Amino acid sequence: MKESLPLPPHADWLPVILEGSTSEIYVIDCDALRFIYANPAALHNLRYNMEELQTLSPVSIVPAVSSTSYREWLLSLLQDEAALSVKFDHVRKDGSCYPIECRLFRLTSGNGNIVIAIGNDVSLRDQSNQALQASESRLNAILSNTPGLVYQFCLDPQGNPAFPYLSEGCEALLGIDAEILQTVPSLFSQLILDEDRPSYLESMQFSMTRMSSWNWEGRIHIHQWNDIKWINLRATPRQLDNGIVQWEGIMTNITSGKLELEEIRRSRAQITELSAHINTVKEKERTRISREIHDDLGGNLTAIKMALALLTRRLPASDKLLMEKAEYVDQLVDRTIETVHRIAGDLRPGVLDFGLIAALEWQAREFEKQTGISCHLGSNKAESEINVDPDLATALFRIFQETLTNIAKHAQASAVEVSLVHEETEIWLKVTDNGRGIQSIDKEKPDSFGIRGMAERARALGGTLSITTPPQGGTMVTIHIPLSDNKNPA
């Protein structure tokens, strides 16, 4: 057994150290299991004074530890001649408890076996650890139920990638074990399809340069499954030390959404094609019926009128009743001929054969006569300079007709301005009125088939139709049609 060390020259420091320490310090007589000394920090925490504490056994303030355990600790110190670390709960005078970690040191003196215990209240630390564990448990529960991969991604100044953190969804999404991907981070970029990789790198560089959110959609190829997935990557960057940029974010599988969107687009394209086909067939049928009405019915009515004129001349002038009947039939034939011309014109105005501007100008004049609303048409080119496909001309004319119909019904306008702009690669038709203006709710009405039909006609031609309210009020309908070679032979 080692001899006791002599006190240092400045042994008078010891009381100051004991009294000023924030750690609990106890001197215990192990043979009698009684407290010899406790510093102010220990008395404060236990809420005893020195006299009260000296009447107590250490077992009194640590009921969970028996006298036998104390003696075993002492035996361990006697055998190993080393300090011993223990943790238990202290019971205060008022019965409340707090956890304490102690280091026990044996001191041999002429008065027997003495143990010095130096301990610290670890209740705050334990509470912090419990709160941290609970927070980690909640976070792990959230991450494990997150549909996708939660990750951290780093890029150093030399462009070397790293994945400091990958959630459990890594293998399910990417087909790569998280540990493998963390070991070889470049495997991720190798999954991205060649045609999508440039946009991935560009979006990453943009996010890193501007420290803005990183949002990217692209395709990856899982080789072991021979599967192509669409993924969405969303992450927020922050600057770390040594020029490293780290993103925290989530990757999700958006394949089903992309496929559904593609199916919607395909269905919409089919509907557009069907609508265009129906409109084409309808216009052809209108043209056929219009010509048959004009040629056959109009020709027959003209023949009837000529025959009636011949019969009228042969009627006796004295028979006034017959003359009146003949004159009535003649007027009836005239009215029928006018009706035939009107119906034929409504089915397909013959003025369309004279060009788009002529047809629009004719419709504008008809609109003025029927409604009394001024309608002015302007164009950047003369009629002879505009040569468009007949189907395109018919579609624009029908959209113009429907627009004027809507103005007459709803706009409460007094003037309409029409602008036709024809360029080499596109054509614009703008119709602006000075009426009350269209409201957003009006465009979304379930029965707004006129507007939908106009938009569908424009879409079938590869163009767009927009309805807006200009700053000066009223409503502006704008039709934009790109011209391809087959639509613009001029």
Image: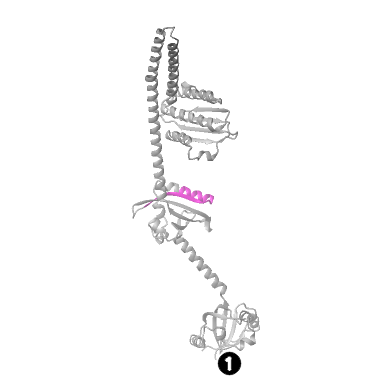
Q: Is residue 431 left or right of residue 332?
A: right
Residue 272, compared with residue 131, is above or below; it is above
Residue 322, compared with residue 98, is above or below; it is above
Instruction: Give residue 164's position: percent from left, percent from top.
Output: 46, 60
SS class of the residue under badge 1? loop
Q: Nearer the viewer, residue 84 or 427?
A: 427
Q: Nearer the viewer, residue 415 or 144?
A: 415
Looking at the image, what colour scheme do you see? one colour
Hey, which quadrant is residue 43 in on the image?
Answer: bottom right
- Residue at point 44% right, 51% down? 232
The kind of residue on which mark 1 rests is Asn
The tally of labels here is 1
Residue 69 shows up from this direction? yes
Q: Which residues are magenta?
A: 201-221
Instruction: Give residue 50's position: percent from left, percent from top.
Output: 64, 85
Instruction: Answer whether residue 214 is magenta in the image.
Output: yes
Decide: few, some or many residues near mark 1? Use Cα within 10 Å; few <14, some 14-19, many ≥20.
few
Hey, which quadrant is residue 473 in on the image?
Answer: top right
Instruction: Answer whether residue 438 is magenta in the image.
Output: no
Please name the residue that numbered disc 1 is placed on: 111
Residue 19, compared with residue 437, is above or below; it is below
Instruction: Give residue 136's position: percent from left, percent from top.
Output: 49, 65
For the C terminus, the quadrant is top left
Q: Nearer the viewer, residue 447 or 110?
A: 447
Instruction: Give residue 176's position: percent from left, percent from top.
Output: 38, 58
- Residue at point 52% right, 30% down? 430
- Residue at point 55% right, 38% down? 439
Residue 424 shows up from this direction? no
Residue 80, compared with residue 173, is above or below; it is below
